[in-house]
Image (cartoon, helix red, strand yellow):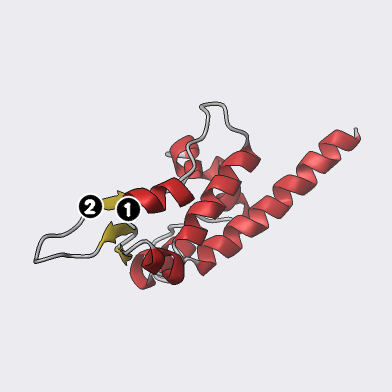
């Protein structure tokens, strides 16, 4: 297993005109892939907000940046992002207790997943209200 096998399982390539829900689900799956057991199964380790192959004979393996589809779409206008709207603050606000800080500093994807799940629930409710009109 390798970085390429992890990307094949957990990285979702979205179309340019992806919906908010599609972006949230892609982000969710990527952070599920950031759980320790999933990284280990692919021979990867977390490294300051990225994932990388383990160091072999002193040579660091390839790494993969760990921002999400929402960052790709909304940055630098984070206030429009559903994660920002759920939290009323950037997910990477400059404190160690931010969801992104938990991932970057502690390799803990669960706070980001909780934030993503809250945004998914909100988006599904919004879509249901829109469909009911």
Residue 42: numbered disc: none
Residue 88: percent from left, percent from top: 59, 55
Secondary structure found at label 2: loop
Quadrant containing the N terminus in the rendered view: bottom left
Contact (Cβ within 8 Å) of mark 1 with mark 2: yes
Q: Which residue is mark 1?
A: 3
Q: Seen in the image, is 96 located left or right of residue 25?
A: left
Q: How many marks?
A: 2
Give the Cα distance between marks 1 and 2: 7 Å
What percent of the width, then of the height, locates residue 130? 83, 35
Q: Residues within 10 Å of mark 2 (few under 14, many from 20)?
A: some
Q: Where is residue 34? Give x, y as percent.
A: 44, 62
Please tell me whether residue 19 is drawn above or below residue 70 in the rendered image: above
Picture quadrant of residue 45: bottom left
Task: From this view, report whether residue 110 is shown above or below residue 91.
Answer: below
Determine whether the residue tagged by mark 1 lies in a helix, strand or loop. Answer: helix
Residue 31 seen in this snapshot? yes
Q: Earlier in the sequence, mark 1 or mark 2?
A: 1
Task: Reply above or below: 44 against 6.
Answer: below
Residue shown at the point (32%, 64%) measured from the top left: 43
Q: Is residue 111 left or right of residue 49?
A: right
Q: Look at 26% across and 59% down and name the residue there.
A: 53
């Amino acid at each position: 297993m390798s970085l390429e096998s992890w990307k094949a399982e957990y990285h979702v390539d979205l179309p340019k005109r992806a919906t908010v829900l599609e972006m949230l689900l892609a982000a969710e799956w990527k952070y599920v892939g950031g759980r320790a057991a999933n990284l280990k199964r692919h021979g990867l380790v977390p490294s300051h907000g990225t994932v990388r192959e383990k160091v072999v004979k002193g040579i660091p393996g390839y790494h993969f940046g760990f921002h999400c589809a929402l960052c790709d779409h909304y940055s630098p206008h984070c206030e429009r992002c559903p994660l920002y709207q759920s939290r009323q603050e950037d997910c990477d606000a400059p404190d160690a207790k931010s969801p992104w800080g938990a991932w970057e500093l502690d390799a803990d994807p669960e706070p980001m997943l909780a934030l993503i799940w809250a945004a998914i629930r909100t988006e599904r409710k919004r879509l249901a209200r829109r469909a009911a009109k």
